[in-house]
Image (cartoon, coloured by chain):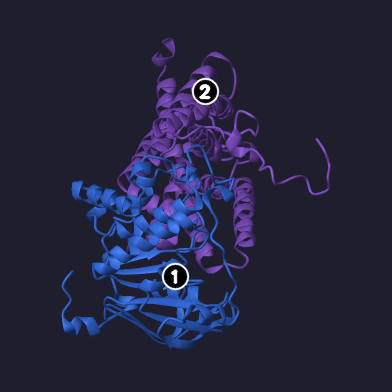
Amino acid sequence: MSTVSEDAAREPVISLRGVTAELGSRRVLRGVDLAVRRGEVVALLGANGSGKSTAIRTIVGQVPVTGGEIEIFGTPRRRFRDWARVGYVPQRTTAAGGVPATVTEVVSSGRLSRARFGVLRRADRDAVRHALEQVGMADRARDSVEALSGGQHQRVLIARALASVPELLIMDEPMAGVDLASQEVLAATLREQVERGVSVLLVLHELGPLEPLIDRAVVLRDGCVLHDGPPPRAVGQHALPGHDHVHPHADHAEPTRTGLLS
Amino acid sequence: MDLLNYAFMQRALLAAVLVGVTAPAIGVYLVQRRQALMGDGIGHVAMTGVGLGFLLSTSPVWMATAVSVLGAVLMELIRWYGRTRGDIALAMLFYGGMAGGVLLINVAPGGSTSNLTSYLFGSLSTVSESDVTAICLLAAFVVAVTLLLRRQLFAVSQDEEFARVTGLPVRALNLLTAVTAAVTVTVAMRVVGLLLVSALMVVPVAAAQQLSRSFAATFAIAVAIGVAVTIGGTVTSYYQDVPPGATIVLLTIAVFVVLTALSAPLARRRARAAAQASGDPLECAIPQAGPDRPDVRVPATRSPGDGAAV
């Protein structure tokens, strides 16, 4: 995984060809072409409703496609089974469910793709701990996720994706609602992954602190690819159609989340 | 313990304990996926099974199991495909199940709505030998599923979309959860009754949440509460002439109230311990301006803009 040959470098880990998808009766994707090659970091940009989240969710199979082809590691998505190679960070504001769960319990779910019959062995527990260390949450391992701030929730979700030691990371707005401190931790985590040779496809609202990591940007508008190339510069980025500015806010700006311990 | 000398009481206690274990065990996953009232829905559907059992003069327990499993599968299918009007479809399933039960039992020879009562509210003293066998088998299935597949069920109940990307068979696990819930409803039917089943699935979990921070602890505490209240309710109904099902449910709610009252000071103590461990101050310290705090004194060059004096 760490040494990538020249041939493998050209092989796309994700490829979408003419993908169309509908939500309800509304056409959200109208023939999207997109490729992420090994070791590449691709940002998917666009205004709200441009179809960027839907594009990601067709790749993971959450939204059915109505046309076109999707391949993951060269295998058609329908026949792809090797999910341990993929780490996924869905768009969430919280990692909590209806019942309390600790940070470790949530992150352990991400290891199930490597654990046979759902039995976590020592190596699996080590991987979970390592994933928590990578996002700087190891000291909160035994805390309830309900007691975390928005940025910490996001770090837990990313640790969950990293627990299977994936070769490909797919992230849907990992920076949404994340305070500045967590944004920097996430950028550092991502840099570490990229240095390991991990390929990344991520939906972003704005490039922000991740900008130096991004090799290529794909801009969607109304379900079509508008731009595919080098990431737009700061000025261009702000000039994107429908761009709205999201200001990261500090932990304590969210009083309801500053639970018992933060 | 003279109550253990009676065979019917032994059966009743065994059935009660099994319900105390199984109902919270599957209930914790239902609460986690925010489908707390699913057990209630299945309970309604199971009534058709009871009616069918009377009509065909087969065991109502097994017939109720078959019909409620079918109903649970149907509910899961509605959840997949009928996204737009899912709630309406579910409502029709629930009330159709209840109406079907009432209709079938009145059609059955010698049957009347009063036969249903023991299934609606539970009737421990009439639990038969064959009922106990059925309850044991079904409870073993529920315990096996909820313990052996706990990590998979946790992942699917916590975040279905993520679970799909870990390669888990999400649909199969959802179906299994629904089927297990249906089986639990029929296990609990004889003890607390179809209309009160859901309480034993949900309230012990809600009570356990007041104390716990982890899923594993919530599971264990909920099952412990379940066993305690079912035994307590059954024994109470032996000494006092009160219906066991209702007693068990009221006891559970009492446990919830007590634990909720206890949880606030417990949480405060935990927060204080955590704050001491991490060195964070627990409360905000606002620096007071004044002669003893020269660092926050208003610079001499600044004065109130409108010339107001203090």
Indicate the chain on which mark 2 is placed.
Answer: B
Callout 2 crowding tier (Cα within 10 Å): few <14, some 14–19, many ≥20: many
Check disc 1 and report the residue beneath it. Answer: A62
Q: Residues within 10 Å of mark 1 (few under 14, many from 20)?
A: some
Which numbered circle lies on residue B195? none
Outermost residue, top side? B2
Q: Position of residue A127 (x, y in %)?
A: 24, 52
Q: Is residue B308 left or right of residue B187?
A: right
Do the residues at discs 2 and 1 belong to one chain?
Answer: no
Vertical order, A46 against B257 (above or below): below
Q: Quadrant of residue B216?
A: top left
Identify by letter the chain in blue.
A
Q: Is residue B286 visible?
A: no
Pick whichever, B308 or B209, lies toward us.
B308
Q: Chain of mark 1?
A: A
Mark 2 and mark 1 residues within 8 Å of each other at the beta carbon:
no
Inspect the image, locate mark 1, and give the three-letter code of the amino acid beneath it: Gln
From this view, report whether residue B102 is shown above or below residue A161. above
Visible in this render: residue A187? yes
Total labels drawn = 2
Q: Cα distance, mark 2 to mark 1?
A: 46 Å
Residue at 47 percent of width and 69 percent of height: A208
Depth check: give the residue in front, B153 or B130: B153
Residue at 49% from the left image edge and 18% from the top image edge:
B235
Q: Is residue A167 left or right of residue B155?
A: left
Q: Residue drawn 58% across and 82% down?
A: A241
Q: Colour of chain B?
A: purple
Q: Nearer the viewer, mark 2 or mark 1?
A: 1
For the residue marked with disc 2, what is the amino acid? Answer: Gly
Q: What residue sits right under mark 2 in the picture?
A: B233
- SS type, badge 2: helix
Q: Position of residue B50 (x, y in %)?
A: 53, 45
